[in-house]
């Protein structure tokens, strides 16, 4: 998304990417939801950035001639009395109430959510930049290209960011299953703690697992079984042709993204810590990066890497 924002802003750039095969963006379902989790936590910057992110994806839809973004409704089911209790205690809070609709005995509806085909968008941009010689496929060593031989580098490396910048990153591994279920309403995501996302022509995705201990990039039998069972519970039908996938999410303790130059000379920058919110945060932060020609002063102050400070052992101590 940073490459895309540079292209739009007319800033010269080159993407160096190790191949994208292990990228979380290839796996992520691209859901952008106003509230997340059992506790209905408002998504950071959802209300402020929803229209902007919609316009960015619509621009790329037009530019690339591909369907990329749509509005979806999320139907949330109460799994037990505890969840019903959480909902009752939160539903009147203004940031929650704004998105709640269609309450009944079994659950409620969440309005305002978006879904983006991030994998499709990135595949198209990669092909475009490969054709134009703006994408080089190789792995960059953690110390990076030296400042003497290269222009400034902004690291957008997802789960491998810890090797480059020692902040208190926290990683979790997420599995997902793709398959086919006929007859689902494509406009509605079903969620009972797991979610089922209907797509085009009977394709569905179901997710996701959350594991902080096993960070290997392989699907597990238990994870896949959990998701297949969830799909069948939510759809009331068998999931056909299940195919598993896995990726890493990365966050920091305050759960906000991390962006900006790490040094006053502006040699090394970062855009990361996108957690399970990359579809919302990445395009807007990339646009902010480019708003002043990559100076970085237009980045949301609450997302800046400078909220951490460099200690004697390097980056990682809490700053501001
Ligand atoms: C199961 C699952 C479901 C998810 N669902 C959603 C969702 O519904 N909505 C949402 O918003 N988010 C979701 N996410 C999170 C989302 O996928 C991430 O926020 C987002 O993809 C992170 O993007 P990124 O560019 O930081 O990292 P990545 O997509 O992982 O990209 C990192 C890139 O850096 C490259 N790279 C790494 N190291 C190097 C190196 N040393 N040299 C060169 N290149 C390198 C890799 O090849 C890769 O292309 C989900 C994640 C998972 C795992």
Image: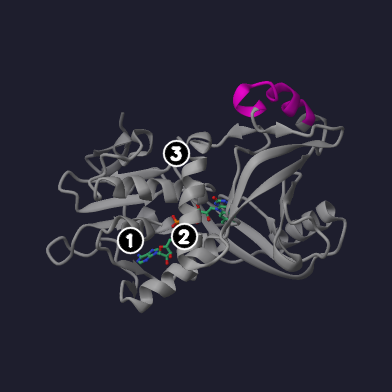
Residue sitting nearer the eye, 134 or 36: 134
Task: Check disc 1 and report the residue beneath it.
Answer: 7
Residue drawn at (28%, 43%) of the image: 315
Secondary structure beneath label 3: loop
Residue 47 as seen in the image, left or right of residue 261: right
Task: Check disc 2 and report the residue beneath it.
Answer: 60
Magenta region includes residue 171: no
Q: Which residues are magenta?
A: 84-97
Q: Residue 85: which quarter of the image?
A: top right
Mark identifier at residue 256: 3
Residue drawn at (68%, 24%) of the image: 90
Residue 95 as seen in the image, left or right of residue 63: right
Which quarter of the rendering shows the C terminus? top left
Which quarter of the rendering shows the N terminus? bottom left
In the rendered image, the residue lying farthest to the left is: 148
Secondary structure beneath label 1: helix
Residue sitting nearer the eye, 20 or 71: 71
Secondary structure beneath label 2: helix
Q: Is mark 2 within 8 Å of ligand 1?
A: no
Discs 3, 2 touching: Cβ within 8 Å = no
Residue 54, compared with residue 64, is above or below; it is above
């Amino acid at each position: 998304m940073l490459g895309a924002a540079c292209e739009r802003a007319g800033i010269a750039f080159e993407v160096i990417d190790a191949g994208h095969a292990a990228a979380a963006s290839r796996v992520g379902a691209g859901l952008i939801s106003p509230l997340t989790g059992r506790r209905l936590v408002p998504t950071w910057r959802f209300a402020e950035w929803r229209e902007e992110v919609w316009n960015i994806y619509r621009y790329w839809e037009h530019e690339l001639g591909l369907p990329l973004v749509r509005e979806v409704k999320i139907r949330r089911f109460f799994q037990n009395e505890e969840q019903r209790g959480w909902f009752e205690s939160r539903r009147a809070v203004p940031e929650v109430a704004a998105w709640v609709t269609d309450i009944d005995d079994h659950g409620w509806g969440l309005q305002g959510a978006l879904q983006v085909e991030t994998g499709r968008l990135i595949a198209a941009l990669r092909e475009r930049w490969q054709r134009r010689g703006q994408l080089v496929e190789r792995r960059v060593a953690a110390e990076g290209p030296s400042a003497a031989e290269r222009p400034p580098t902004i690291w957008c490396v997802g789960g491998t960011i810890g090797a480059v910048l020692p902040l208190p990153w926290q990683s979790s591994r997420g599995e997902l299953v793709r398959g086919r279920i006929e007859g689902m309403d494509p406009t509605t995501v079903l969620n009972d703690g797991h979610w089922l996302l209907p797509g085009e022509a009977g394709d569905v995705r179901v997710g996701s697992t959350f594991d902080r201990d096993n960070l290997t990039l392989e699907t597990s039998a238990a994870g896949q079984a959990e998701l297949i069972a969830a799909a069948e519970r939510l759809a009331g039908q068998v999931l056909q042709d299940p195919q598993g996938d896995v990726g890493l999410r990365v966050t920091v303790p305050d759960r906000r993204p991390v962006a900006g130059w790490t040094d006053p000379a502006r040699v090394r920058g970062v855009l990361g810590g996108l957690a399970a919110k990359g579809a919302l945060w990445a395009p807007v932060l990339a646009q902010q990066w480019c708003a002043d020609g990559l100076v970085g002063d237009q980045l949301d102050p609450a997302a800046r890497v400078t909220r951490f400070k460099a200690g004697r052992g390097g980056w990682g101590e809490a700053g501001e």
